[in-house]
Amino acid sequence: MFKIEKLFTMRSCYYFLIAAFMASTVYGQSSAQVNKWLKEFQPSTLSKAEQRRELEWFAKAAQPYKNLEIKVVSETITTHEYEAKTLAKAFTELTGIKVTHDLIQEGDVVEKLQSQMQSGRNLYDAYINDSDLIGTHYRYGRAVNLTDWMKGDGKDVTLPTLDVDDFIGISFTTGPDKKIYQLPDQQFANLYWFRADWFARSDLREQFRSRYGYNLGVPLNWSAYEDIAEFFTVHVKTIDGKRVYGHMDYGKKDPSLGWRFTDAWLSMAGTGDKGIPNGVPVDEWGIRIEGCRPAGSSVTRGGAANSPAAVYALTKYIDWMKKYAPPEALGMTFSEAGPIPAQGGIAQQIFWYTAFTADMTNAKAVNNADGTPKWRMAPSPHGPYWEQGMKLGYQDAGSWTLLESTPLERRKAAWLYAQFTVSKTVSLKKTVVGLTPIRDSDIRSREMTKLAPKLGGLVEFYRSPDRVRWSPTGINVPDYPKLAQLWWKNVGTATAGEKTPQQAMDALASDQDRILKRLERADLGACGPKLNKERSADYWLKRKGSPKQKLANEKPKGKTIAYNKLVANWRAGKSVID
């Protein structure tokens, strides 16, 4: 018996020593990888010791999933390219989980997501898709409720230092039940862009004031934007021998035309109701909710998709493009029109995504020799139907989404990678690369203060109290994929001259109501659509809020603000939205 016990003890010690040796080897390998990647992940709001602890946590938490191969997908922008090329490699080396991070077009991401939601077949282990789908995810029950996940099945793989409250877009990914359904990965806003060097020229300022009776500056309303567009296109015409235009846009009947409108064009005009992040009860899609139930898009159901404000928004979009943009703009898609301002012939653009900031900083035609920009970004001007308390523009929040159809082991591994890409260890470096900030701590860092002079107002905007007025599509939209495709098809009939703006918006409202009715029959639960009975348009237009009656004067006097004053107000913590 003694010999047997001794042998057992010796064997136990042997296996213990082997395990200890293997653990120390793994730790040594992990430590070497941590040292390697710490150099890449600078700057950071964390100290190197804090970064090290986060990276070591990932390595340890991933041990049960080592050698597992996972696939994730996102659209193709600079931020996601950095993730796919650098962060996926870093995560694989640190954890042993092999990540394939696919980059495809945004529309294809939604198609893949929709396919997996409908079929239950696991195409990807995680998606970075726009938080515009929050109303879809909340109602269909196919997306993982992250609030419960982090306390339940995902607790052992949830980063202790994730700090959800630090995410500036977390309200965008929160459902009516106050649960988080997506984790923000990148954000960019849709702002006003202009040539600050031209706006500062004394000769142009004198000419503008003489003609319009107020100062050339950042337009606060659409009247001023229109005056400035006319000024540069019709009266200035050329600068330094080059033809210039006071407006840029795109109008080809193409799926990207839908973004031009669903990305909050109607809210800029003032179509919806007051409410942050989205109008209540009527949002920027013109969809009315009663409680949490979508109740209609048509004015006759209390919606505003074909209201006077919506028709005004479409009319101005078409008029300005035809009168003040380069002639080729009407036949361009989003991707074709995007690079045009950087070529140096555009004075201003009312609808400009800050995702283009990184590319704009490298364009010689619009930057000084020292790298500082000749351009600036500023708040979007608003239309005459807009009121204080309303959102003023769109903000894209590409966010990590897990689906219930993904096997638990793969879902946990994907969740680790998702958190890695937004952790404080890497988030500031990722922000510097892609300029799509997600954390308040990053925005207020010394590094961003240092970069601010070369970013044309991006940092000032994100530090301002006004940033909350820019938000994605909200919970009023119960099925984003089905409803979004209606916009470009209907708006395109107006840009092509096949229908009047009123006819196009009437058709859109009718089509949206048809989809809502179909979803009502499908019964999406307590917050599924339930359409209002139709009433006369006057019944709804005479009520307070949206839909709003047609204004007698849709072009009040133009109002502008000096850019330096605007920035000074922001730095003092004051709103500049009039």
Image (spheres, rainbow, N blue to C red):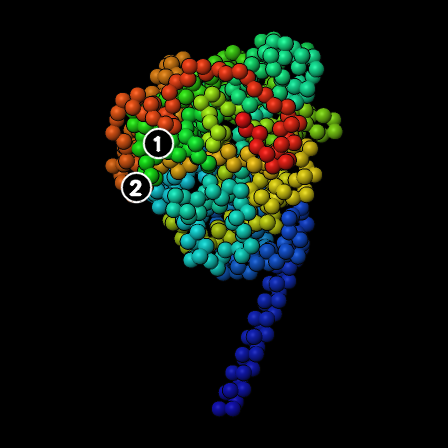
Residue at image location 34% in from the left, 39% down from the top: 292
Mark 2 vs mark 1, foreground winner is 1
Which residue, as the protein is rendered here, is positioned at the far bottom?
1
Q: Could you say which is closer to the camera, residue 547 or residue 237?
A: 547
Residue under label 2: 524
Which mark is on residue 288? 1
Q: Kindly tell me whether residue 368 is visible in this rendering.
A: yes
Looking at the image, residue 85 lies above or below residue 210: below
Where is residue 43? Give x, y as percent: 67, 46
Which mark is on residue 199? none
Residue at image location 60% in from the left, 46% down from the top: 441
Name the amino acid, label 2. Answer: Leu
**10 Å neighbourhood of mark 2: few (<14), some, or many (≥20)?**
some
Where is residue 459? Give x, y as percent: 62, 36
Where is residue 365? Give x, y as percent: 67, 22
Q: Answer left or right for 174 relative to 299.
A: right
Residue 563 picture quarter? top right
Q: Secondary structure at mark 2?
A: loop
Q: CA distance from mark 2 to mark 1?
A: 17 Å
**10 Å neighbourhood of mark 1: few (<14), some, or many (≥20)?**
many
Q: Kindly tell me whether residue 122 is visible in this rendering.
A: no
Residue at image location 68% in from the left, 37% down from the top: 451
Name the amino acid, label 1. Answer: Arg
Label 2 vs 1, first from the N-terminus: 1
Q: Answer left or right for 325 relative to 34.
A: left
Q: Could you say which is closer to the camera, residue 501 or residue 104?
A: 501
Where is residue 158? Give x, y as percent: 50, 55
Q: Secondary structure at mark 1?
A: strand
Q: Answer left or right for 402 relative to 37.
A: left
